[in-house]
Image (cartoon, coloured by chain):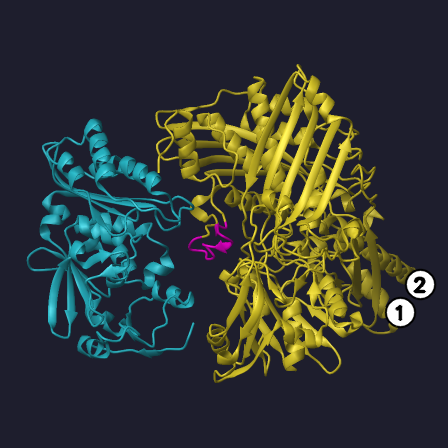
Chain colours: A cyan, B yellow
Amino acid sequence: MTPFELLEPQTLPEALALLSDDDAGIRPIGGGTALMLMMKAAVLAPTRLVSLRGLQGTLGSIAMTADGALHLGGLASLSALEHSALVAQHAPVITRAMTHLSNVRVRNVATVGGALAHADPHMDLPPVLAALDARVQIAGPLGTRELTIDELISGYYETALKRNEIITGVQIPASAGRAAGRCAAYLKCTTRAADDWPALGVAVSFLYSNRTISDARVVIGAATDRPTRARAAEALLSQSMGDATTLQKAGDALAAEVQFTTDAQGSAAYKRQLARVHLGRAVNAALAQT
Amino acid sequence: MDAKVIKEEQIGRSVPRMEGAAKVTGRAEYIHNIRLPGVLHGKMFRSRIAHGRIVSIDTSAARAVAGVHSVVTGEDIQRLIAEPYYGPAFHDQPVLALHKVRYVGEPVAVVLATDPHVAEYAAGLITAQYEELPAVFNEVEAATSPIHVHDELKPAITFPDLKHLKGKRGTNIALDYKLRRGDVEAQFASAAHVFEHEFHTQHIMHTPFEPFVALAEPMDDSITIHTSTQMPAYVRLEIARLLGWPENKVKVRTAWLGGGFGAKVYVKIEPMVVALALLARRPVKMSLTMEEQFYVIGKHATTFRIKSAVTADGRISARKCEVFWNGGAYADIGPRVSQKSGFTSTGPYRIEHAQIDSAEIYTNLPPAGAFRGFGIPQLVWAYESHTDIIARALNIDPLEFRRRNILREGDEHPTGTAMRDAEFEEVLVRISARMGWDQPFDRGTGTKRRGRGIAIGVKASIAPTTSFALVNVSADGSAVLFCNTIDMGQGSNTSMAQLVAQVLGTSSERVRVTQADTDVTPFDMGTLGSRSMFHMGHAVRLAAEHAREQLEALCAETGIEYQDEHSIAQAFRKKFGMQAGNIFGVGHYTSRYQPADHDTGMSKEITPFWMIGGTGIELEVDTETGHVTILRMVNVVDAGRAVNPRVVDTQISGAALMQMGATLSEEMVFNEGELTNPSLAFYKIPGMRDMPVAIENEALEAETRSGPFGAKGVGESGTFGVSPAIANAIDDAIGVRLYSLPLTPEAIYRGICAARGEPLVD
């Protein structure tokens, strides 16, 4: 790893001022769990790192907003999410997903904003947040803006973030909350060891009343180059009872509509099969929460 | 020995590990933690091509970096050592690449700097020009390929059976072990059944959590090497040979090892740090990263073609084995693996007609060498999968088929050595009893199918080898054992202390074991191949007995009855008038061995003892994804008498779980010789959540009459049966037979699809 300058601003304006849209050598760093590995592997050799740790006090909170949305601070650690009573109440799917996300050492320092900005398709949080219709809040030198996960993550390790922008928070709307009757589940499937980057992540969420599914959202991660909605599968699930025949049809639709990628975790053909099977398993896991 | 003076039996006692507290509290010393004033850190520049002639190396940019002390290439090393080639079997490996590079990742140059980050940065600025040569990677192809990794074979004189390869050109075959017994072809022509299969294993890495680290410290007229090695005495010999120095000017010391598993045998980075330190005239330290370990040493990938003739009543009458060992670019100890394990290729079965061809083959991949099991797991994988296929094809219960053919006491192994103290059948009996093999078995329903499988393997000990030990008894009756057996996590210090205490009639806790330091600890061949408890165990026993004889004489002279350490202390005080003096007991042991005949591979005494391990597996397969859950793993070994039952138990499970990783997930993936997954993020060893639901281990109540107190080695036996037992259980569950490791979910799912005639289309 080559030497670099480390800056530790204490406020958001200070941090933004230290970043630059023009200089690829200047990078913000949250928990650093991904960045440091890339630097050790010499994939990345930044000249200046702007640590966001000092902003954890202001941007690390987890709270309910006035309109009933769940706000996750951009600097909130993943273990803060894991242990938050608010998260467990409003979006228990996140709590469950955290227990098998990497390991406790990573969760203790990795941040919500980092998990989104890194845009490695194998990460667990983006598909979960996408299935919960989350909005990502971004601050830059010209002010703030808000994007969906779909808008934010534009490709394989690619985002719509500018180099001088910071993710300040994520909001999960009231309509996606447990109180609104939304069920959700996230299943991940590893193929080499239990603690591994997944070959597939499937996040589902839907409303469930009168034994009928509606407004289903299905988001595939890891097996694709970015978190990907499966709209044909969603359409089949919505207005169904989530019965075995529907789940099979929805799995087939998902397998047909999503572009799977081959990587070290498995071939595209195998991931397609994993996705076909795991959609039904995820829906059943979500139904089991009702 | 006089039994009445022993207060408590030390043999068979689960004495707590002596270093346990120091390790868990972070106080144990490791070589990584050594800080020396004036030290230079070395970082390597490695080849990015698999095979080529070095045209030029441009180090100018690296030299210009502020803080760089020097940049060293192979030609610089030659200023110090004219023939800078090392290796236990062949003198084939240059300290730094000379003239040619032979694999991606081979060290080409080293930058020295006081700051390791500066050295690393500067190493990244080095460039090299090569004249690229065609490369060969597959072991079967390389056996006959016109592409040759080495122009000429240069066997080391230490291995008499490699003499005939001296100066040989135009080949990649670094050892060709042959066994010829009876007439296999005649049997194949007339047998009721003939079965033939080909099996494959993959390259894997040892993954010690302490990567290679060594520090060379030039002294006035000698050199001290602090290194994480399993073989301090060999390191001293080889460094002395390279430098042309007497052995006593080279001091090699170790601290605790954070795992070895065969990776840290013979010499690895020691010649490099020594040469660098002598060139720089300053201490030099090299600490490899986890990623760099992949380019040092691994486990042989293999192709094993096996053919058996079976009689109408289910007896194996002939077996032909053709084993190709992918040794990578440098032989290391690979030729020993392909011979010492190769001669067991027919398995633990009584087979009258046997033929083995076991060849060590050079390829343009990172070197392969010793790896927990020393080649045996690759062989057992093939012959026990093959055995199960035969049993199923003949509709004979797999356990019954094995028992019908298993070697029994006094039977002749195909090499001609008679079986002694080798409890093969009892291992099978205990596995099957624990598994309830004769009871109905829940085979699962729907998409969750269950199956079970067993497998058993045999290993010979490396022979002949020698161990020396020295016991120093102080005037208060406490003792220090000086021995070169390296405790790399297996608990040998505790077990060796128990042997001393047993003989002296003291408690194990009153015996301390030193870390290896070749200035004071006597010679030992090395800590590998499960040889230490047998060989060093004998040497320690003899040294302690020698000490005891002298102590008894001292007691007799002073009129004190020899009872325990208190009486020893009394005798010393009486003799010397105060608490003063020492008693030194020395002992050494060389195992008996008769070399195999070059043409027939036969010997009446091919090994001083046999190691036996078997595994039973119950598992569940998810037929929609190919995922396997191991519900139960039963490991049974014949380890002779267990000196420390708890240590033995953890050795069994440690070995078995390591092999489970080699079976299910671990694989070094190469693309045209380039390793695509050199990191723990992409090379997956099992974690806690991959453990079997239930695991149980058993060391038979056995005795090795030729061993110290009836004991023998146990470090590897747990590995033998794991891979084929899992494959056999998968076949039992879903009727899918797999011939290549690792057994990944995708491989299993593809097998399921193929079996139903709908192969998975990419």
The residue located at (80%, 52%) in the rendering is B163
Bin the neighbour count of mark 2 within 10 Å (Cα to Cα): few under 14, some 14-19, many 20 and up: few
Q: Looking at this view, is B441 or B202 the one in front?
A: B202
- Which numbered disc flags the more N-terminal residue, 2 or 1? 2
Q: Chain of mark 2?
A: B
A136 vs B426, left or right, is left
- Residue A237 visible in the picture: yes
Whole-angstrom CA distance, mark 2 to mark 1, is 8 Å
Residue B733: image location, x then y, percent: 45, 27
The answer to whether marks 2 and 1 mark residues whose Cβ atoms lie closer than 8 Å is yes
Q: Is residue B327 above or below residue B620?
A: below
Q: Callout 1: helix, strand or loop?
A: helix
Q: Which mark is residue B557?
A: 2
Does the magenta-highlighted stretch encompass residue B99?
Answer: no
The quarter of the picture where residue B551 lies is: bottom right
Q: Chain of mark 1?
A: B
The residue located at (21%, 32%) in the rendering is A247
| Viewport quadrant of the C terminus of chain A | top left
Tell me which segment is drawn in magenta. B668-682
The residue located at (78%, 73%) in the rendering is B245
Residue A198: image location, x then y, percent: 34, 48
B375 vs B597, left or right, is left
Residue assigned mark 1: B575
Residue type for callout 1: Lys
Residue type for callout 2: Glu
Bin the neighbour count of mark 1 within 10 Å (Cα to Cα): few under 14, some 14-19, many 20 and up: some
Furthest-right residue in view?
Answer: B557
Q: Callout 2: helix, strand or loop?
A: helix
Report the magenta stretch's main SS: loop
Q: Looking at this view, is B741 or B134 the one in front?
A: B134
